């Protein structure tokens, strides 16, 4: 968990992140163990919490249930990625439940929400769009983003902060988030 705390996008949220971690770590491990052996399951869970820490301030705008579902979907995706790297992924079973107990209808709604989010990000000015894409979609660190964009880390952090603010305002204005 120390790695996650070091990567937390807003250090003032450390206590909330600790609580989130303690409440969900065993569930995340059980989810990963559905796909992987113990050591790889632990890797998938750690990678998932690192991803959550990198944009935890945005997750704080969601309900506790939505944060839990986000984590479980991330654990499942990381598990599948690890299986693919080993050449052992054969696809999900047709009747396999989605992480977080999402029904098929809820999954469709989540996918539609994701599509709306992608549409809004793509409509943003390029200055913010690339930073948001690298930080939120590709899950690059500020250092990796700065190197890839040939900017200082301070410039990346400023663009990321402004981009997140603009994204949140646009999502609220369009009624995508309440």
Image (cartoon, grey):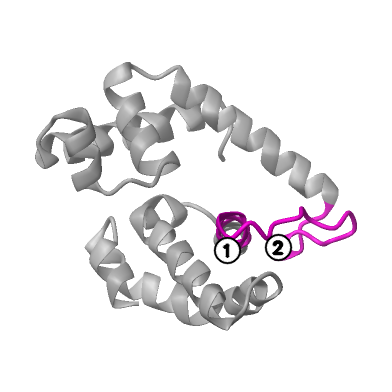
SS label for mark 1? helix
Report the side of 104 relative to 139 (left or right).
right
Mark 1 vs mark 2: in front: 1
Q: Give the range drawn in magenta.
A: 75-103
Residue identified by numbered label 1 = 75
Which residue is painted at 42% across and 57% down in the image?
51
Are the two marked residues, 1 and 2, in contact with CB atoms closer than 8 angstroms? yes
* Figure quadrant of residue 65: bottom right
From this view, report whether residue 30 is shown above or below residue 138: below
Residue 126 picture quarter: top left
3D distance between C-alphas at marks 1 and 2: 9 Å
Q: Mark 2 points at which residue?
A: 99
Indicate whether residue 89 is drawn in magenta.
yes
**Residue situated in front as seen by the camera: 4 or 123:** 4
Q: In this view, does 171 lie above or below 40?
A: above
Quarter of the picture containing the C terminus is: top right
- Looking at the rendered image, the quarter that the N terminus falls into is bottom left
């Amino acid at each position: 968990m120390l790695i996650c705390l070091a990567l937390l996008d807003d250090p003032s949220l450390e206590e909330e992140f600790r609580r989130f971690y303690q409440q969900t770590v065993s569930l995340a491990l059980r989810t990963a163990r559905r796909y992987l052996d113990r050591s790889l399951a632990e890797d998938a869970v750690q990678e998932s919490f690192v991803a959550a820490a990198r944009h935890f301030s945005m997750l704080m705008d969601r309900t506790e249930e939505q944060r839990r579902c986000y984590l479980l979907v991330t654990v499942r995706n990381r598990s599948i990625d690890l299986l693919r790297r080993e050449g052992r992924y054969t696809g999900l079973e047709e009747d396999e439940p989605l992480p977080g107990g999402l029904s098929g209808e809820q999954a469709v709604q989540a996918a539609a929400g994701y599509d709306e989010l992608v549409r809004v990000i793509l409509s943003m000015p390029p200055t913010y769009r690339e930073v948001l894409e690298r930080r939120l979609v590709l899950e690059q660190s500020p250092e990796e983003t700065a190197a890839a964009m040939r900017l200082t880390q301070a410039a990346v952090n400023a663009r990321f902060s402004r981009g997140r603010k603009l994204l949140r305002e646009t999502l609220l204005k369009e009624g995508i988030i309440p």
